[in-house]
Amino acid sequence: MSVLTHGFDRPFDEAERPARISKPRKAQLKRVALRTLAVLSMGTLLAAVIALKTAVYVWHLHA
């Protein structure tokens, strides 16, 4: 963090500041983030399977 915007009288350590997000809200955000990651992973896997099946189909078509 920049000294120009931070000031010298406050500590740089963020551990001394109280949490801005409550624990239940943080847990909810964590669950949403994990579900989003799972959905994106499944979408990526589905796209890879479709691409593989298409490649195999095209390969057999030209053989």
Image (cartoon, rainbow, N blue to C red):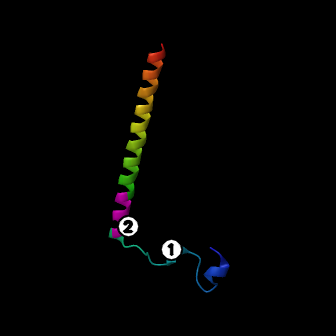
* Residue drawn where x is 44% and y is 31% of the image: 51
Q: Looking at the magenta stretch, what is its main secondary structure?
A: helix
Give, as a three-letter code, the residue at label 2: Lys
- Front disc: 1 or 2: 2
Q: Find numbered disc 2 in the image and state the secondary structure of the residue it sits on.
A: helix
Crowd rating for badge 1 (residues with CA inside 10 Å; few <14, some 14–19, many 20+): few
- Relative horizontal placement of residue 12, taking residue 47 as reference (left or right): right
Instruction: Tell me where residue 48 appears, x and y as whole percent.
Output: 44, 35
Instruction: Tell me where residue 47 appears, x and y as whole percent.
Output: 42, 37
Specify start and end residues of the magenta stretch as a single range.
Answer: 25-32
* Residue drawn where x is 41% and y is 44% of the image: 41
Location of mark 2 (residue): 26
Camera-nearest residue between 58 and 10: 58
Camera-nearest residue between 57 and 27: 57
In the depicted structure, whether residue 22 falls above or below residue 36: below
Location of mark 1 (residue): 15
